[in-house]
């Protein structure tokens, strides 16, 4: 059972597709947490529907295209995914190329295939549903499940988190690359990702 720094805290996280490691450090520190998708849609906020991985040449951004909303006043949880183009194949191939040689890629990738194969837009027609499916699998891998759904927010968890370098599959060639999706931590460290998140949470909030 993971140690929880703030068991009564429910942290509202920014809505993200395969969010950054920093967001999961906050989630690790709290008794419960969830992404808040109730904010108004803003087409300028591209980070909501894209994530960053590290491939053979460095950072690579993968974007899920979204359908043009009928109104600019809709919320993020109402935004639909575009059905045009096989973007899921692009994402799957990019992840295979980037992380196929990491210690834990083969161990985890089957859990993510529903979000990376034909039919994904039928299974998850809205961005919120797709991001939640990714988040559910990631949290299960990290041991971030919780029965609590609400609590007192902890404003100080909004502080900036400085991540320490961790083992990356191409670190000897490219050096440590920061600012990546939580998927980078999962595929490179596997179960050790829990130890890393715990260390970063203690350094950031204790």
Image: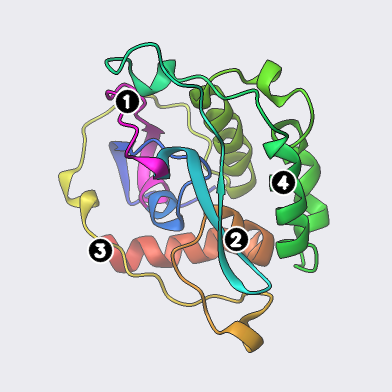
Separation of residues labelled 3 and 2 (CA atoms)? 25 Å
The residue wearing badge 3 is 206
Nearer mark to the viewer, of 3 and 1: 1
The residue wearing badge 2 is 184
Q: Residues within 10 Å of mark 2 (few under 14, many from 20)?
A: many
Separation of residues labelled 3 and 1 (CA atoms)? 35 Å
Q: Which residues are magenta?
A: 26-46
- 71 is higher (above) or lower (below) than 21: above
The one of 170 and 32 positioned closer to us in this rendering: 170
Label 3 or label 2, whichever comes before in sequence order: 2
Residue 101 image point, x, y percent: 80, 68
Residue 44 image point, x, y percent: 32, 39
Q: Residue at x 47, y 60 (%)?
A: 197
Query: What's the mark number on residue 90?
Result: 4
- Indicate the colouring scheme: rainbow
Find the residue positioned furthest to the top. Answer: 70
């Amino acid at each position: 059972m993971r140690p929880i720094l703030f068991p009564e805290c429910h942290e509202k996280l920014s809505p993200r597709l395969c969010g950054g490691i920093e967001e999961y450090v906050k989630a690790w520190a709290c008794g419960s947490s969830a992404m808040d998708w109730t904010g108004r849609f803003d087409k300028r906020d591209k980070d909501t529907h894209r994530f960053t991985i590290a491939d053979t040449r460095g950072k690579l951004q993968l974007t899920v295209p979204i359908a043009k909303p009928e109104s600019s006043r809709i919320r993020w949880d109402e935004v639909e995914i575009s059905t045009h183009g096989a973007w899921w194949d692009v994402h799957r191939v990019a992840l295979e190329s980037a992380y196929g040689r990491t210690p834990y890629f083969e161990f985890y990738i089957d859990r993510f295939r529903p979000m990376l194969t034909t039919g994904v837009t039928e299974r998850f027609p809205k961005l919120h549903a797709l991001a939640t499916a990714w988040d559910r699998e990631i949290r299960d891998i990290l041991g971030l499940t919780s029965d609590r759904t609400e609590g007192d927010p902890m404003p100080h968890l909004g502080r900036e988190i400085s991540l320490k370098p961790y083992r990356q599959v191409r670190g000897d060639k490219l050096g440590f690359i920061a600012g990546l999706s939580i998927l980078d931590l999962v595929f490179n460290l596997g179960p050790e990702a829990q130890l890393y998140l715990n260390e970063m949470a203690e350094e950031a909030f204790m």
